[in-house]
Amino acid sequence: MGVLSDGKTKLELFVESEHEMIDNIIAQHPVQRGQPMIDHTQRESKTWDFEGKIMAGNQHLVDNKFTQLLTWQEQGVILSYNGAIHHPNLIISHLEKTYDEGGYSNAVKFSISLTNIRIANTSFVKAKHVGAKAPTKPKSPGKYVTVVAGNTYWGWWQKYGTPIQTLRNWNKWPDRRIPIGVKARVA
């Protein structure tokens, strides 16, 4: 007997045989003469095959148990198995039922394959949505003045508080040659 569980629901299976398989994928490259050249192999996840019967008091309960297996397979639910072996982190990779000998009134023959998966831990943190963002205020186009005789960057710094170097960058005129009558940005 074995028990398959998702941590909430337990399903008892009358297992008659258990098989463990470990496969490798072997990369082969054809060579002009001779045997294919092999440059690497890749180990696949372990797989366990089980055969047995799903049994219950009546056929309706048997069907419910098989439906639970189908649901776990369809949703890719991570399961654990306790029987001759114990292993967590399994997913149903193959499931079938057989009606040999005309079937049974309170059981069904099944075969199932469980494949081991590795669960990776990542440092990814999903950003939390805190609601709609308030619209940002458009940047002020700045304050401009018409240049009159005697205006200087130093004077504008005193009056408006804008640093002298910022005034130079905005207006691009040499300190002693600020043209009269043009508009100058001061804030």
Image (cartoon, helix red, strand yellow):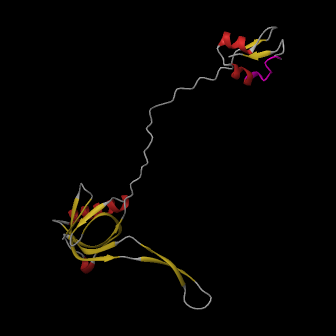
Q: Where is residue 89 in the image (x, y as percent from the top left)?
A: 31, 62
Residue 184's image quarter?
Answer: top right
- Nearest the camera: 14 or 115? 115
Q: Main secondary structure of the magenta part?
A: loop
Q: Position of residue 94 (x, y in %)?
A: 36, 70
Label tally: 0
Magenta part of the protein: which range? 170-176
Q: Position of residue 22 (x, y in %)?
A: 36, 76
For residue 120, above or below residue 26: above
The outermost residue toward the left is 57
- Nearest the camera: 92 or 158? 158
- Nearest the camera: 127 or 114? 127
Quadrant location of the C terminus in the rendered image:
top right
Q: Position of residue 115 (x, y in %)?
A: 35, 68
Residue 108 is a magenta residue: no
Residue 91's image quarter?
Answer: bottom left
Quadrant location of the N terminus in the rendered image:
bottom left
For residue 74, above or below residue 144: below
The outermost residue toward the top is 149
For residue 173, above or below residue 35: above
What residue lies at 18% left-to-right and 65% top-to-bottom? 58
What residue lies at 54% left-to-right and 89% top-to-bottom? 35
Residue 130's image quarter?
Answer: top left
What residue lies at 27% left-to-right and 79% top-to-bottom? 100
Residue 146 vs residue 20: left or right? right
Residue 171 is a magenta residue: yes
- Nearest the camera: 89 or 36? 36
